[in-house]
């Protein structure tokens, strides 16, 4: 299957928004990112309703992070997804693919209409992202603990090639129970990969229960510090704070942004409920959720 | 061809691997090496001395090592990811599948000291499952060079191949059996001797032994075709089917488990297109006892005598 093509009209809109946001006041910027994210939540809800499957809870906890990164932080070009000096973005928690696809389409990486095919037979939009089909995807994720080591390789390559490009990897908090992440964290700390940023979607829930009841992660900031990382904690739904914390390292060390989030954020009856990890809403629930999301 | 493993000069293929890789790296700055604290055992001492910035030792962390390789390839580099074969393929199998093969990035996975090269260290350190595991993964050529000549050719080929590949780089010393002008192409075997009584298809350390077996049988009046199959996957289906059609049977020999490797690939092909009698030589479904590599190869009949015996059984049918 061919790689999806960019949507130039949407990419142009995205570019003007980026320019506008760069010169807006922080409250204006936050308000505009909020509008984008609300639209994306509605889009994701409809994608999962249509597909009859998906991971709504984690999609909604990570969505404000993805919105902020793609509309306000990353140095990328949706019309040139393989531009060598682009920032590298990796969604290691690949099961939040619906949120990623909706975000990429909102930047013009591919036409929004493609989102209607999410998980349909022969769609480019598999339940987990595939770099050979979807522009904007750097590596195929899905099994947890894979994206972070690849991000370390991306950051090592940028350094070898004397490029100022950054690498940003978004990790689930439950995902941190996979040991491969700590191999990667140790390597990044050892090599002082200051152009590498890890964002942890700290929603405190995993598929079956709370993270702290399953295999405790706290004290999470101390763990990262002890691996040689600069730790920043932030409300993962506060656009203004996300923009100001997803900035480059000032310490020469890699940066981890521990983004405290709410699983299912934006829909009251989904928020912080373990069952919405991959529950599919009924038609009534979709209607109720859309009302809460402003429609 | 009258090469006998017992008399010929023998070589550790890691030397040829390292020399070729370093020579290629001088001409192409995209080539980098990644390893897991295996600078010495992967023979990367010279490479690191010459290209310290292009040598990434991630420590004892194979999952990270393969992911790092995929990230380096994402930037247009050509990483040769080197580790002892059992740990590279066993520990990091899911990274090989998802980050490399499925993601389709040109990482060259180099399984050093494969098969039972670590003899006495035991089954934890043997890599006899690698061919089966990796054959099951799409988009990943599985390459087992027979000698230093073919090792050099494989390294050159892999550096230019646009996708991922796995190279099995032998430590157990083998004679040079590959003609210097032999072609090395994706999915292509090399016929080393002609014959229409029986075919022996061998890979890696078994190739010189297959030639020695053919020589034994020649003195008994049987003409044996020896096919060296450096690509366990994709298989040279044309050569295998021609052997099935024009000789009386096929013996396969590999320093690997018989569950799913070269012999299984050949059997699956001929069973579906042109069934012929076969013998599949390798390690049967057991963990090896304690012993040196030479002892274990003898123990499992992976010798010239063992191959000749299997061929005689088929000839006598």
Image: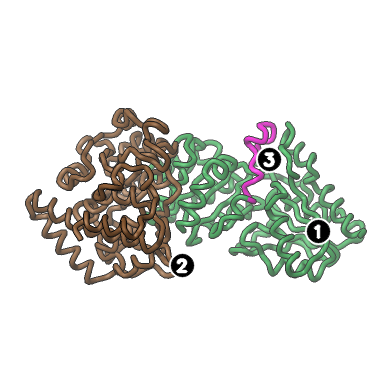
Chain colours: A brown, B green
Nearer the observer: mark 3 or 2; the answer is 2
Name the side, left or right, on which A216 lies relative to A267.
right
**Dot 2 corresponds to which residue?**
A121
Q: Please determine if labels 3 and 2 lie on a single subunit.
A: no
**Dot 3 corresponds to which residue?**
B116
Q: Chain of mark 1?
A: B
Q: Is residue B125 magenta?
A: yes
Q: Can residue B26 be seen?
A: no
Q: Residue at x 44, y 52 (%)?
A: B31
**Dot 1 corresponds to which residue?**
B278
In percent of width and height, residue B104 lies at 46, 58
Q: Is residue A55 above or below residue A233?
A: below
In percent of width and height, residue A169 lies at 32, 47
Q: CA distance from mark 3 to mark 1?
A: 24 Å
Q: Are marks 1 and 2 in contact (CB under 8 Å)?
A: no
Name the side, left or right, on which A42 lies relative to A206.
left
Name the side, left or right, on which A138 lies relative to B280.
left
Q: Chain of mark 2?
A: A
Q: CA distance from mark 3 to mark 2?
A: 44 Å
Q: Residue at x 74, y 58 (%)?
A: B201
Q: Please determine if labels 1 and 2 lie on a single subunit.
A: no
Q: Can residue A177 be seen?
A: yes
Please provide the residue range marked out in magenta.
B118-132
Name the side, left or right, on which A84 lies relative to B204.
left
């Amino acid at each position: 299957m061919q790689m999806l093509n960019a949507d130039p009209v949407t990419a142009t809109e995205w570019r003007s928004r980026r320019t506008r946001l760069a010169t807006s006041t922080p409250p204006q910027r936050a308000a505009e990112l909020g509008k984008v994210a609300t639209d994306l939540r509605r889009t994701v809800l409809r994608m999962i309703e249509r597909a009859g499957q998906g991971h709504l809870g984690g999609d909604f906890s990570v969505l404000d992070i993805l919105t902020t990164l793609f509309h306000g932080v990353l140095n990328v070009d949706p019309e040139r997804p393989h531009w060598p000096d682009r920032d590298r973005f990796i969604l290691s928690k690949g099961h939040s693919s619906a949120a990623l696809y909706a975000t990429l389409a909102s930047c013009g990486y591919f036409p929004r209409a493609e989102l209607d095919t999410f998980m349909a037979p022969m769609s480019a939009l598999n339940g987990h992202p595939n770099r050979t089909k979807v522009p904007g995807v750097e590596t195929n994720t899905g099994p947890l603990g894979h994206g972070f080591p690849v991000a370390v390789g991306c950051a090592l390559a940028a350094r070898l090639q004397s490029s100022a490009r950054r690498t940003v990897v978004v990790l689930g908090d439950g995902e941190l129970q996979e040991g491969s992440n700590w191999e990667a964290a140790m390597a990044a700390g050892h090599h002082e990969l200051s152009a590498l940023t890890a964002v942890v979607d700290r929603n405190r829930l995993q598929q079956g229960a709370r993270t702290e009841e399953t295999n405790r992660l706290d004290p999470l900031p101390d763990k990262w510090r002890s691996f040689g990382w600069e730790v920043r904690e932030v409300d993962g739904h506060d656009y203004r704070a996300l923009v100001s914390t997803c900035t480059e390292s000032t310490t020469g060390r890699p940066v981890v942004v521990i983004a405290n989030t709410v699983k299912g954020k934006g829909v009251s009856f989904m928020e912080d409920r373990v069952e919405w990890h991959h529950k599919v809403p009924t038609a009534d629930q979709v209607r109720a959720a859309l009302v809460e999301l402003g429609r | 061809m009258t090469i006998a493993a017992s008399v010929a000069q023998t070589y550790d293929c890691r030397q040829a691997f390292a020399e070729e890789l370093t020579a290629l790296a001088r001409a192409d700055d995209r080539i980098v090496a990644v390893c897991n604290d295996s600078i010495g055992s992967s023979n990367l001492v010279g490479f690191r001395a010459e290209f310290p910035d292009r040598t990434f030792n991630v420590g004892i962390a194979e999952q990270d090592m393969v992911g790092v390789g995929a990230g380096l390839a994402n930037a247009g580099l050509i990483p040769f990811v080197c580790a002892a074969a059992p740990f590279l393929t066993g520990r990091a199998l899911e990274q090989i599948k998802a980050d490399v093969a499925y993601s389709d990035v040109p990482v060259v996975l180099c399984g050093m000291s494969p098969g039972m090269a670590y003899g006495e260290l035991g089954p934890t350190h043997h890599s006899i499952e690698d061919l089966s595991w990796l054959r099951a993964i799409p988009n990943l050529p599985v390459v087992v060079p027979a000698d230093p000549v073919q090792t050099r050719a494989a390294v050159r080929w892999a550096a230019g191949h646009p996708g991922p590949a796995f190279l099995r780089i032998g430590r157990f010393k083998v004679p040079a059996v590959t003609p210097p002008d032999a072609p090395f192409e994706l999915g292509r075997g090399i016929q080393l001797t002609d014959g229409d009584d029986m075919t022996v298809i061998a890979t890696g350390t078994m190739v010189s032994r297959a030639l020695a077996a053919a020589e034994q049988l020649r003195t008994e009046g049987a003409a044996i075709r020896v096919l060296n199959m450096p690509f366990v996957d994709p298989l040279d289906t044309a050569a295998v089917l021609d052997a099935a059609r024009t000789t009386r049977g096929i013996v396969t020999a590999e320093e690997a488990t018989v569950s799913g490797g070269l012999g299984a690939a050949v059997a699956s092909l001929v069973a579906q297109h042109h069934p012929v009698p076969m013998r599949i030589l390798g390690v049967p479904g057991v963990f090896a006892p304690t012993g040196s590599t030479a002892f274990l190869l003898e123990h499992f009949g992976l010798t010239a005598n063992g191959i000749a015996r299997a061929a005689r059984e088929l000839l006598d049918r």
